[in-house]
Amino acid sequence: MRMQLYETSNRLIRILITLFFLLCTLSGCAMVGPRSISMGRADYNEAINKTEDEQLLLAIIKGRYCETASLLAVSGVAANVRFSSRAGAQFGIGPTENYKGNLVPFSAGLAYEENPTITYAPVHGERYLRQLLSPIPLDVLVLIIRAGGASQATYLTMLANRINDLVNPDFLITSSAGTDHRFQRFVELNKMLSELGVLHWVEDPRKEVPFDIVITGYAPTCAGQAREYLQLLGLPFPPDASKDIILPVSFSIKESGSNGVAISTRSTYDLIEILSAAIEIPKAHVRSGLAAPSPPPGLAGKDIHIHASKEKPGDTAVRVRYRGYWFYINDNDIHTKFFYRMVRILWSVSIAEAADQRAAPVLTIPVGQ
């Protein structure tokens, strides 16, 4: 009878222990699963963002050295997660002195393994070329300006190369050429009137043109600025200052007798060329003629800098190694980082439009053991 009770007791203990480890394993999976998503997603995103920055910078540098650069777009990330668990228990039978201190009553373990697979699509072809070389569409420009806030003047200077007769060249090609201060004043007034709630970029309800610049409630406080704004555009100031000023905005060159605002924009390639000209070419490479010379930048590129150093730099926003030098953007150079971010956004759009996995072979790399 005593032996039967002993066996029943042992069996009950085993069942309880098995249930205990089963619950531990299930709860472990429940905890590790969501945690792997929260940790892994941020890591993958940061790695992709960092390598995209480096790929763009390297392509810009190679362009300055008149070399080709191949591009790969990350088109897919698949992370396979595998969990394995083990549980065990040891029991003694017979006199206690036979196994006392030699047994581990309970043991358990949970293993987590992640095997990511990264898929790349090469970027090339006519679609990519068109995206890269086409002027930035007017609707995109207006959206960026409206969302720009305090950076509105910087965006307009960066993206527009002509507004009516105000010219904003990429480079100062001739020795007599200089920055058109009228353009600079125009973007300052545009920002000032926008921040005061007087000037608005809006869609044209009549659909005759896509957008209008509406100047409203400007008198008497902002009448002087509104008058100067129109003067710079070569447009007359209305005789009745109580009426709204509505200026149709078109994607074109200003025609004689026009009463609106004609804007032409840069392409993504133009912006990349401006960045390329901002590269500090090592003196040894200048002497040997490795890199192409570049004319002085215009208003958009005059304050951007990409440095070069033999030693690996410390605080950088992005850096790449090329031809024995480190090329980088300083982490505290806000203006260059701002310009680089906009180029990166527009360049990413070009890549997304051009990277078609159905038309081109893809490269899939398992990153596991």
Image (cartoon, grey):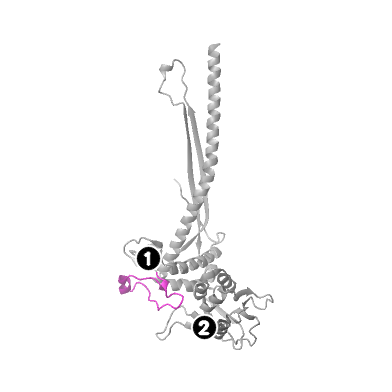
Q: Is residue 99 magenta?
A: no
> Does 40 sit left or right of 321 as displayed?
right
Residue for point 37% across, 65% down: 327
Q: What is the C-alpha distance between the residues marked 2 and 1?
A: 34 Å
User: Of tags 2 and 1, which is closer to the observer?
Assistant: 2
Mark 2 or mark 1: which comes first in sequence? 2
> What segment carries the magenta color?
276-305
* Nearer the observer, 77 or 211: 211
> Dot 1, how many residues are within 10 Å of its Cα: few (below 14), some (14-19), or many (20+)?
many
At label 2, which amino acid type do we have? Leu
Find residue 121 and report its horizontal and vertical position in percent: 51, 59
Q: Is residue 302 magenta?
A: yes
Find residue 75 and report its horizontal and vertical position in percent: 53, 57
> Does 96 sit left or right of 360 as displayed?
left
Residue sitting farthest toward the top: 1
Residue sitting farthest toward the front: 220
Residue for point 46% across, 49% down: 367
Residue for badge 2: 166
Quadrant housing the C terminus = top left
Element marked by disc 1 = strand
Residue for badge 1: 327
Find residue 145 and report its horizontal and vertical position in percent: 56, 72
18, above or below 259, in the image: above
Task: Give the main secondary structure, helix, strand or loop, of the magenta stretch.
Answer: loop
Residue for point 60% across, 74% down: 201
